[in-house]
Amino acid sequence: MRRKEFKVDQEEELVSFLNGMSFGFLGTSDEQGQPRVTPLNFVYTDGCFYFHGSHAGSKMKSIRNQQQVCFTVADEYAFIPSYFSDPELACPATAYFKSVTAYGTAEPVEDISEKASVLSLFMKKLQPEGGYDSIDAEDPKYRPRLKGVAVVRITPEEITAKFKFGQNLKEEERSGIISGLSERNNPRDEETIEMMKKYCPFHAE
């Protein structure tokens, strides 16, 4: 059961998180109903997820057979060891993270102008420094390539998000974890502390 204190409903929060991530996991099923999870790059725009690849292969075959899919994006910030909270029990060990899961319909994009627009977003996300000619559906260099690549749009029917940063903890427990993270000082520990303060219902601005 999804705990309500970890839910995120603000659209800006979701869009900001998704725009900052480049990798997700596509869930499909084949003709026999066997599940399949495929890691891939994605972009999110106008309320839809997009990915690209070959027209052939089991992923595209699964989508042609069953268009209902799920897509998950997750980012783990920090592992929280049990001894930050309890010197004996293993139970408090956990991880703090952000995750978004969408359930919806996947369909191939046929319009090459839409393909060009989506692939331009991929390049801006993955190669922001430039170093390439802009993708234009009317450019003879790109037109045959746009026809040859598969671009898939996932239109969500439901999106759920979970940002877990100790919102369920008492203030004393949260302070202990913040102290532990400060002392440990792993690469993302300071960032995790900022997220704890941001989402903490007791934190005073």
Image (cartoon, rainbow, N blue to C red):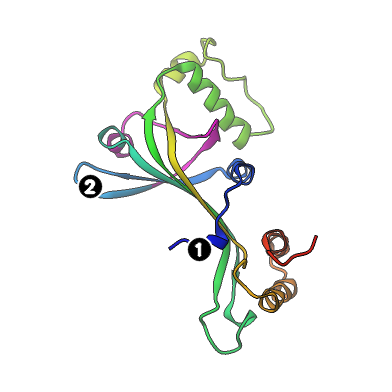
Give the x, y percent position of residue 115.
48, 22
Residue that appears at 73% across and 60% down:
194
| Residue bounds of the magenta highlight | 38-62
Towards the viewer: 107 or 137: 107
How far apart are the alpha carbons under marks 2 and 1? 29 Å
Q: Residue 39: within the magenta?
A: yes
Ranked by sequence position, the earlier of labels 2 and 1 is 1
Residue flagged by tag 2: what amino acid is it? Answer: Gly
Above or below residue 153? Residue 162 is below
Above or below residue 25? Residue 42 is above
Label 1 belongs to which residue? 3
Residue that appears at 37% across and 29% down:
107
Residue that appears at 63% across and 24% down:
132
Residue flagged by tag 1: what amino acid is it? Answer: Arg
- Left or right placement of residue 29 versus residue 153 in this view: left
Disc number for residue 33: 2
Give the x, y percent position of residue 149.
42, 25
Local crowd size for mark 1, using a 10 Å CA cut-off: few (<14), some (14–19), many (≥20): few
Q: Residue 53: within the magenta?
A: yes
Above or below residue 118? Residue 112 is above
In the rendered image, the residue lying farthest to the bottom is 88
Numbered disc in front, either 2 or 1:
1
Secondary structure beneath disc 2? loop
* Residue 71: quadrant of the picture: top left
Local crowd size for mark 2, using a 10 Å CA cut-off: few (<14), some (14–19), many (≥20): few
The C terminus lies in quadrant = bottom right
Residue that appears at 52% across and 14% down:
137
* Residue 61: quadrant of the picture: top left
- Left or right placement of residue 67 versus residue 97 in this view: left
Give the x, y percent position of residue 58.
29, 39
